[in-house]
């Protein structure tokens, strides 16, 4: 788990190593243990290292192999690297280190892009082919590891975080109006390749790109998530699917324990994180730490779920850490959390994950987290609405979108307004793609391959990496994801959603955390704006130094006149969403 960066020039000039050094050192929190650079003619690579898989200098990066003519910068973790290493050794390759980095380098030499389907893990990496002068970039199936790009006619740069990429200079940081439309309507989800900035892109998940020293580019999606059971699965009943889901989840948890000495779990007290604790105990992990966070109540809404996390911690005898955060500390730490964001995110979970990661990093270097289960196994309230709708797209939009087009148009000033309903068009076109026939499967595919990537997954990566903490997400194991997509909706939707996963969980954990109302990481103070928090948000929106000419003053007046009554369909504050964008821009110096 690390931070990577690089530059490839297209004009026969040496790469700008000084720019790559600035970018790389801005990634220091992602890799606090070591750093390194490789520069050769048109290419420069940078790396910040968090030592997990192999603690020796043998796995230092960028890793070069003069005999193979390759140089690698890699961010992530390949869980099946021992099996791949054995396969490569059988082909005659010899190894000088004990981790996954050298396996990735030699695997690329052996198989090229055909290596990618062999990998089980999370990754974003760059390989420089010295002799052909080509750069290969790739990202994992579900986008757990990020990769941001900046391209001009003279060069391509990349980095693990957007703010770091800006440190290289030579980027006009203007907003992208289409991305702004997505941000305001599609719950702050800006689908790849766009980012909130017009001149920065991100490599889409499950995609590779190859660029030569003349700038010629190839790009390909190397994995998709098809929905519907296989031919030999059509007659399976609930018990059959439960068996398969439990076994696949068990395997996903176990393989993520490789090279993890101090084990932690982010324990919300819900089904997903509780199941991880149960399966880790089942796998023989004895010294298990669990971590929960809570906030002050506000607007009549409870700010913690300690009742359930305490129950699981007591049941399994974990070393439990309970963190309660007051309003003062939330406001004090929000700027730092937004500095750690690669793109502005409105979810209240961000500050929760940021502060929880700060605590976890004092005890562990690796933590397991339950992201992905809701999107893969239909845990959200809108899936039944989409399933029974005559117009699935309209039902999804009504449940998930923060605004309709008219309200969005009234929120931004004319120069930032796009004429078309960009976010709506994107979702409509995604629903129309082949590969998911059932209405609910169209929504699940969108959420699993787009929303999940650019909201929950990005949130966990950004907030844990801000503290040099490696988060492993078993529900995003590609084998479990593929299995979940084959499970028919009738086995997912009952029981408030995630039915088949809950049935699997009943065989492992106490029923009290299963038969309960679904919860979240709540931060009520950022939803029900009042007191000091409301004053802080008002300053973010009305202070002259924060005015970038983006938001319409009349809309700001309207929202501020009734701050508690302006909630989105997902029960988020519309005021907070606008303030969050201003805060992110300010913290990035934009």
Image (cartoon, helix red, strand yellow):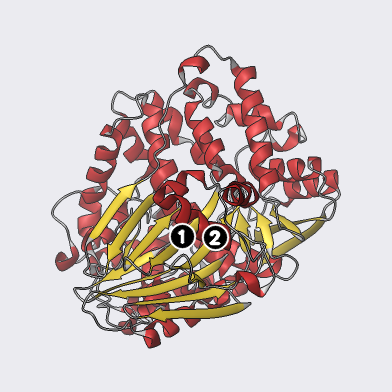
Q: Nearer the viewer, residue 320 or 541?
A: 320
Q: Position of residue 565 (x, y in %)?
A: 41, 54
Locate the N terminus and report the quarter of the image it occupies.
bottom right
Asked if residue 46 shows in the view, the reply is: yes
Q: Is residue 571 visible?
A: no
Spatial separation of the CA atoms under disc 1 and disc 2: 7 Å
**Residue under numbered circle 1:** 124
Residue 512, which numbered label? none
Task: Look at the image and tell me in which quarter the C terminus lies.
Answer: bottom left
Relative to 496, say whether 28 is above or below. Answer: below
Q: Nearer the viewer, residue 67 or 397?
A: 67
- Asked whether 39 or 162 is in front, the reply is 39
Q: Is residue 543 toward the left or the right of residue 516 in the image? A: left
Read off the residue under disc 2: 76
Query: Image height check: is 22 above or below 224?
Result: below
Circles 1 and 2, Cβ within 8 Å, touching? The answer is yes
Establish if 586 lies above or below 137. below
The percent position of residue 530, horizontal first and vertical second, equals: 50, 66
- Identify the residue at image location x=28%, y=27%: 391
- Answer above or below: position of 223 versus 325: above
Looking at the rendered structure, the secondary structure element under dot 2 is: strand
The structure residue drawn at horizontal position 31% and vertical position 59%, both measured from the top left corner, is 210
Q: Which residue is located at x 61 percent, y 71 percent?
A: 467
Residue sticking out furthest to the top: 235
Q: Residues within 10 Å of mark 1 (few under 14, many from 20)?
A: many
Image check: 359 left or right of 566? right
């Amino acid at each position: 788990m690390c931070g990577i960066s690089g530059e490839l020039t297209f004009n026969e000039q040496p790469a700008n190593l000084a720019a790559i050094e600035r970018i790389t050192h801005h990634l220091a929190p992602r890799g606090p243990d070591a750093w390194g650079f490789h520069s050769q003619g048109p290419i420069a690579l940078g790396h910040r290292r968090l030592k997990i898989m192999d603690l020796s200098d043998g796995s230092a990066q960028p890793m070069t192999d003069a005999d193979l003519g390759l140089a690698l910068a890699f961010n992530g973790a390949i869980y099946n690297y021992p099996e791949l290493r054995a396969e490569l050794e059988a082909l005659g390759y010899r190894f000088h280190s004990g981790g996954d980095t050298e396996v990735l380098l030699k695997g690329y030499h052996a198989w090229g892009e055909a290596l990618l389907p062999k990998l089980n893990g999370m990754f974003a990496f760059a390989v420089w082919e010295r002799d052909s002068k080509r750069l290969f970039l790739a990202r994992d199936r579900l986008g757990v590891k990020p990769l941001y790009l900046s391209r001009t006619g003279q060069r391509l740069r990349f980095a693990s975080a957007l703010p770091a990429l800006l440190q290289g200079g030579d980027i006009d940081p203007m907003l992208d109006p289409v991305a702004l439309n997505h941000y305001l309507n599609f719950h702050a989800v800006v689908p790849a390749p766009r980012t909130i900035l017009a001149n920065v892109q991100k490599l889409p998940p499950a995609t590779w790109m190859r660029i030569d020293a003349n700038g010629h580019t190839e790009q390909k999606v190397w994995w998709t998530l098809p929905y519907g059971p296989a031919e030999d699965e059509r007659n399976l009943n609930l018990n059959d699917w439960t068996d398969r889901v439990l076994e696949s989840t068990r395997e996903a948890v176990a393989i993520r324990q490789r090279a993890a000495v101090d084990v932690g779990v982010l324990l919300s007290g819900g089904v997903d994180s509780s199941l991880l604790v149960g399966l880790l105990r089942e796998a023989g992990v004895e010294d298990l730490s669990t971590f929960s966070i809570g906030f002050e109540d506000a607007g009549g809404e409870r700010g913690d779920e300690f009742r359930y996390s305490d129950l699981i911690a007591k049941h399994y005898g974990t070393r439990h850490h309970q963190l309660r955060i007051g309003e003062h500390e939330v406001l004090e730490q929000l700027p730092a959390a937004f500095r750690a964001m690669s793109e502005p995110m409105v979810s209240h979970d961000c500050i929760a994950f940021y502060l929880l990661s700060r605590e976890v990093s004092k005890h562990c270097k690796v933590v397991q987290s339950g992201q992905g289960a809701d999107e893969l196994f239909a845990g959200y309230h809108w899936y039944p609405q989409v399933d029974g709708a005559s117009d699935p797209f309209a039902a999804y939009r009504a449940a998930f979108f923060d605004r309709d087009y008219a309200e969005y148009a009234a929120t931004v000033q004319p120069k930032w307004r796009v004429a078309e309903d960009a976010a709506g068009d994107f979702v409509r076109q995604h629903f129309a793609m082949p590969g998911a026939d059932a209405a609910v499967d169209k929504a699940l595919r969108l959420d699993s391959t787009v929303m999940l990537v650019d909201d929950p997954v990005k949130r966990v990566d950004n907030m844990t990496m801000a503290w040099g903490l490696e988060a492993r997400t078993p529900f995003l194991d590609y084998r479990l994801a593929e299995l979940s997509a084959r499970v028919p909706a009738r086995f997912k939707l009952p029981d408030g959603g995630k039915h088949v996963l809950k049935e699997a969980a009943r065989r492992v954990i106490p029923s009290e955390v299963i038969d309960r109302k679904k919860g979240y990481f709540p931060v009520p103070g950022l939803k029900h704006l009042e007191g000091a928090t409301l004053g802080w948000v008002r300053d973010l929106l009305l202070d002259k130094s924060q005015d970038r000419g983006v938001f319409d003053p009349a809309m700001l007046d309207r929202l501020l006149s009734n701050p508690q009554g302006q909630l989105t369909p997902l029960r988020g504050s519309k005021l907070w969403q606008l303030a969050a964008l201003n805060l992110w821009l300010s913290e990035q110096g934009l």
